[in-house]
Structures are given as structure tokens and as C-alpha cells.
Amino acid sequence: VAFRLGRRTSEPVLEVARVAHALREGDSSARAEPGGPPETAELGRALNALADRIHELVAAERAHAADLGHRLRTPVTALRLDTDLVEDEALGARLREHVDELQRSIDDVVRDARRTARDELPGTSSVPPTVADRVDFWRPLAEDQGRDLTLEVSAGAHTPVRLAVQDVREITDTLLDNVFAHTPEGTAARVVVHPGLVGGSTAAVVIVVEDAGPGMPLPYRGRGYSGAGSRGLPLRGQRSSIVHRVTEAAGGSVDLGTSSLGGLAVAVHLPVAEAAPARHEGAQG
């Protein structure tokens, strides 16, 4: 009798725990089926209501991000058209350059706003397949520019990390874009994925993007710092700060150093995702 009464209480609680773990891993459609004692059933209903509320908030944020992009880009387009009417060629060219910089800044702001609304709950992913896909995407451009772009993946680097695939893709694209934008054509680049640590104790998967360019004498000092005169990872705009914010929000870190190729090396340490507690079969009978 005690065993059956225990199962009547434990099974609904374990079901709620399973749904909570699924939500934590990014499955926004997971919902509990309330059952068992009244207190346990109420716990399931409360978890479902929380998941529904998160979904509503993210949907509203997505709509806001889309509206933000439209509202900001429309006046910039009008401003660009007006610069074509400037008769002074030197002034017109300077104004168009300013408009282009403004457009890039707006794109970065909108991209960052959409990133926060992309996933309702943080997900997990395996880094090597995503990085390999992005390296393949950039390889044709590398070949056109005479660059030797290589990828190395170490054993043990396939452990899932606490980032969604979209975030890993954005980090990789941003770092490769920096190589192409801030090193001369023909400069070799290498991407390495290997296991490592965050803070000396937490297991992590590390993405290293390095090049044979001139390097960067000044380290990243946070958003708002003016990196005039620096080379390599661009300190102006928001894309480089996005890499830091995304990584640090997941509990990781970004290190800048000297590449073995002679240029800049950027190492992104992404914490390994914690495995969900195994379901105890003994509690199921």
C-alpha cells in the first residue's frame, strides 16, 4: 500500500520535472499533464501557465523587433536618396559614407534585438557541425581572395554547449567576418574547435579563430570603449560586443591573444551543457 501511494505522488512530480527539463533545453512546446494529488496537479498547471506566459512575451518581443527594423530603416533610405541630390561630389561621398555607417549600426541593433527574441528559452547544441557549416559557407570567398581557410576539430569537442545553434552560428560568422574585413586578401585563417575550461574549472568547448594578419594591439574593454587605431577584431559598432554578450550570458568567456599564424587569435569558451538528471526507474516501480 505504501509503495502504491508513493508512486501516486512520485510519478506526477517526475512528469513535471521532465517537462521543466525540456523547457530548459529549449523545447517551448513542452507542457505537463496535471495529475496526482491536488498539490502536484496545481504544480503542473502553474508550470504550464509559466511556459504560456513566456511564449506570449517572446511573441510580443518578436513583433516589436520587426517593427523596430521597419521604423529605423525607412528614414535612412530616404536620407540615402537625399544624398544623391547633393551637387558637391566630395560632400556627397562623405554623407553617403555616414549613411552607410548609420545603416550598419541600425542593422546591428535590429539583429541584436531579434536575437533576444529568437528563442523562448535557452537551448543546447553541438558546436563542430555548426562551425563546419559556417566555414564551408565562407570558403568560396576565401578561395576568391586567395586565403587558406582551414578547420581543425579535436576529439571531445562534440559535447553539447549551453547555446542554441543560431547563437553558435552568429559567433562563428562574426569572427570570420572580422578576419575578412580587417586583414588583407591572401591572409591565411584557421578555425579550431577543441575541449577546454571556463574559469579554470568549468568544462567548455572552445572556438578559436586565428589569422596571419597584423593582429590587434588593444584588447576588447567592453561596450562603449573607443578602440581607435586598433586592428583585427573591430571595436567600433556592435557586432564584436554581441559576441561578448552572447558568450558571457551563457557563462562563457572571450579571450584575445596572438595567433600561432602571427596575427590575432580569438578564443570563445562555451560552457558544456549540464545533463538532465536521469529518471529514477525505481520510483516508477
Image (spheres, grey):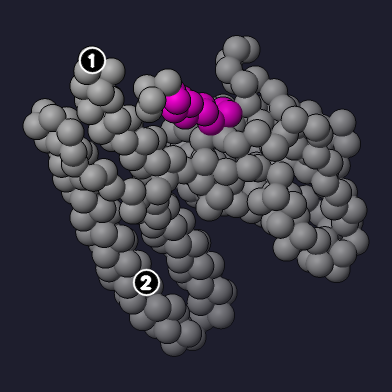
Under circle 1, the secondary element is helix
The amino acid marked with disc number 1 is Ala
Label 2 vs 1, first from the N-terminus: 1
Q: Quadrant of residue 230?
A: top right
Whether residue 28 is situated above or below residue 196 in the rendered picture: below
- Residue 131 percent location from the top left of the image: 70, 49
Which residues, given as a range, are shown in magenta?
A: 271-281
Q: Which mark is residue 73?
A: 2
Foreground: disc 2 or disc 1: 1
Q: Which residue is mark 1?
A: 2
Rendered location of residue 81, percent (x, y): 42, 84
Which residue occupies the foreground of this view, 88 or 3? 3
Circle 2 packing at 10 Å, graded few (<14), some (14-19), many (20+), is some
Secondary element at image label 2: helix
Using residue 125 as the reference point, say whether residue 196 is left or right of it: right
Query: Which image quarter is the C terminus in?
Result: top left
- Give the left or right position of residue 131, taking residue 214 as reference: left
| Helix, strand or loop: magenta stretch | loop
Q: Quadrant of residue 126?
A: top right
- Residue 159, percent from left and from top: 65, 33
Q: Position of residue 82 (x, y in %)?
A: 40, 82
- Rounded to the nearest whole Å, what is the CA distance between mark 2 and mark 1? 66 Å
Q: Nearer the viewer, residue 29 or 106?
A: 29
Q: Which is more toward the observer, 19 or 78? A: 19
